[in-house]
Image (cartoon, rainbow, N blue to C red):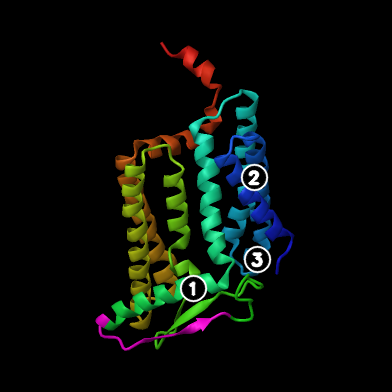
Amino acid sequence: MFTYSEVILWIGIFTLLFGFISEYNKHHFRILGFALIGVFWVTESPYFIYKSDYVNAALCIITLPLFLYFAYNEYLSKKWDEDPEVMRFLAGGISIGMLIYFSVQRMPIISGYLIKIVADHTNVLLNLMGYEFTVGPIMYGETSLFYRTSYENIRVSIVGSNINIILACTGLQAIAAGGALIYSTDADSKRKIKSLLVIVPTLYIANVLRNVMIIYLTYEDITSFYTAHNQIAKTGSVILLIILMLIVFEIMPEFYENIMSVISLPKREPIHQKQQKQP
């Protein structure tokens, strides 16, 4: 299912990435990359509407004006002949994060293997709790092994629990985004590695524990799958992300400065003009 949206996705990612790593016409590449990625997310909205997931559909649509706003700010960088850290942070974080995630998500043979690993680790903990569940085979559906040809979820069943592990259960989105944003921050390598060693293992372990909790609460009829997954687990995930972000802020103050600079983009003015205002 290599459609026009797939072309837009990959051209957008690599264009934005080139604008991050190269000095050659970097502003032009970033402007185009931001715009194309924004368009790509809009093309994903019909899938969520079809699945009656109107929240994610709305988020996909909202992404377009947001990314066009990033493109506009990159245009201002070109116009003012400057390259502020916040724009490099956005270009690197978005392009690298999406490259990691979609390289796995769009290649079933890789995503299936990752899902199987998470399912195995989830089941190990469940077995330690006394459950006699087993892990089923990777179910690819009708998609190609080398590039996704359908929207059908690749899944691995925890046999006996009536729960399937899919890519969303692996924590890949949060790990890719967090890792990419840390890498794109202008800080020394030692502190970047330290931050990654905090973020990556914690997110992975937390997602395995999250899977265990959902299966436990559902299997024991303590609550519904919807409540366990969409309310309890998601609330816990948000709290964990906030805590991890605060830890990274402590390790890398530059990361905090980048986040605040993104929030302050509407107040942005030329760097030389800002410097003239300082006493």
Residue 192, position as x, y percentages in the image: 36, 45
Quadrant showing the C terminus? top left
**Residue lying farthest right?**
4
Of the two numbered discs 2 and 1 on the same chain, state the one appearing first in sequence: 2
Of the two numbered discs 3 and 1 on the same chain, state the one appearing first in sequence: 3
Residue 117, position as x, y percentages in the image: 41, 74
Foreground: disc 2 or disc 3? 2
Eyeballing the image, is 192 above or below 135?
A: above
Quadrant showing the N terminus? bottom right
Q: Is mark 3 on a helix, strand or loop?
A: helix
Of the two numbered discs 2 and 3 on the same chain, state the one appearing first in sequence: 2
Q: What residue type is labelled 1?
A: Ile
Q: Give the range drawn in magenta.
A: 128-140
Side (left or right) of 108 relative to 32: left
Query: Which residue is more in the foreground, 97 or 14?
Result: 14
Residue 166 bears which disc, if any? Answer: 1
**What separation in Å lies between label 3 and label 1 (alpha carbons)?**
17 Å
Residue 205 bears which disc, if any? Answer: none
Q: Which residue is drawn at the image coordinates 56% and 62% (left, top)?
A: 103
Which residue is labeled 3 in the image?
47
Side (left or right) of 75 relative to 176: right
Quarter of the image for residue 125 reads bottom left
Residue 33 bears which disc, if any? Answer: 2
Eyeballing the image, is 253 above or below 231?
A: above
Q: Residues within 10 Å of mark 3 (few under 14, many from 20)?
A: some
Whether residue 104 is visible to the viewer of this picture, yes or no, is: yes
Q: What element carries label 1?
A: loop
Q: What residue type is labelled 3?
A: Tyr
Q: What residue type is labelled 2?
A: Gly
Foreground: disc 2 or disc 1? 2
Quarter of the image for residue 189 reads top left
Query: Which residue is more in the foreground, 99 or 266?
Result: 99
